[in-house]
Image (cartoon, rainbow, N blue to C red):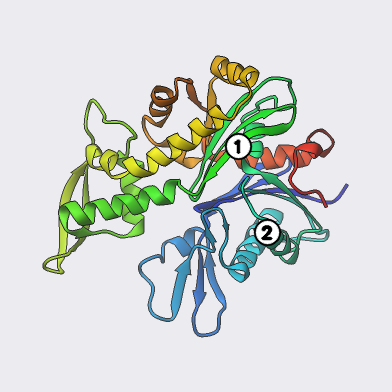
Amino acid sequence: MFTKKIGIDLGTANVLVYLAKKGIVANEPSVVAISTLDGNVLAVGDEAKEMIGRTPDTIVAKRPLKEGVIADYRTTEAMLRYFINKALGKWQIFRPEVMVAVPGGITSAERRAVLDAANVAGARATYLIKEPMAAAIGAKIPIDSASGHMVVDMGGGTTEAAIISLGGIVSFKSVRVAGNKFDTAIAEYIRKKYNLAVGEQTAERIKIQIGAALPLREKLKMEIKGRDMVSGLPKILTITSDDVTAAIEGPLASIVSAVKEVLYGAPPELAADVMEKGMILTGGTALLKKLDQLLTETTGVPAYLTDEPLLAVARGTGFALDNLDVYKKSLLYVK
């Protein structure tokens, strides 16, 4: 009864932590700053992200997760320990139960890495749940009903589309294309069209402020700063939302293709259910302007943004952990 329960959305771009009876207690970038001299962790989360692109040779600021899975085990462990300690507060007598949301297409080796990292970071028991399932629970979709429900979770590293019925995933597709690929595409487009080199954080700001999946009736403009590729000197220029729409056309096509593949693979009865109810969009990338309209137009299935899409997966992990007896059969791993 004294054991605390923590739900974690271990994302490529952000880590969100849900604490039972308190809700979301942490929402920070999944970035860790490490000293190259002794290997010590210097900063995690918001503080570490501020260092990206600004560090001396003695410090490396990096994301330990790539495309939704652990790329650097030791750094991920340090990051998990930081977020678990932040959720628990100063006084920790009992080790917590932890549920971590992982990509639906995770391999057994990647799954073991997450379990080991969580246990070493201080978890007494660790449970894993697939991100589309957690997103559906967090979006308050009745996943146990004998009816088809479609959820598309778009994070920083992966986009996962799934049709869920009777507490299980019936049709599923995961592609390692999401918000980070948009950032890379935007930076590459600006470099080729305007001969201007911009950093990762600038590309992300462009996406958030003026990015759109379809051309906007009233074009948005943004002044950006970077390094001129010809002169090598700092330069300022203005870009429009149409530039961003053109830049992310390729990654968007991959997401649309994945959604269509899930719809093609659905049994006719479930496909009819989805057509009637529409698909629910979750994850931070779902906030891209007109993305719901793009999916509706390309698939013929209405697409709806859930309330606070960025928080859906984290909330789902927390709800599932609070109601293990109800959602146990829907988990990927139960220890």
| Residue linked to disc 2 | 114
| Residue 126: % across, % down | 77, 54
User: Do tag 1 and tag 2 residues touch (Cβ < 8 Å)?
Assistant: no
Query: Which residue is painted at 54% across and 27% down in the image?
Result: 263
Query: Which residue is painted at 41% across and 66% down in the image?
Result: 51
Query: Which residue is painted at 80% across and 37% down in the image?
Result: 329
Instruction: Tell me the kind of residue under disc 1.
Output: Phe
The quadrant holding residue 253 is top left
Numbered badge on residue 126: none
| Residue 275: % across, % down | 54, 17
Question: Who is closer to the viewer here, 282 or 146?
Answer: 146
Name the N-terminal-most of marks 1 and 2. Answer: 2
Numbered badge on residue 172: 1
Tell me if residue 10 comes above or below residue 319 in the rendering: below
Q: Can residue 307 be seen in this view?
A: no
Question: Who is closer to the viewer here, 297 or 265?
Answer: 265
Could you say whether the residue bearing mark 1 is in a helix, strand or loop?
strand
Q: Outermost residue toward the bottom?
A: 37
Callout 1 environment at 10 Å: few (<14), some (14 to 19), or many (20+)? many
Q: Distance between the residues labelled 1 and 2?
A: 21 Å
Tell me if residue 275 comes above or below residue 72 in the rendering: above
Instruction: Tell me the kind of residue under disc 2.
Output: Val
Could you say whether the residue bearing mark 2 is in a helix, strand or loop?
helix
* 5 left or right, relative to 2: left
| Residue 84: % across, % down | 68, 58
* 84 left or right, relative to 33: right
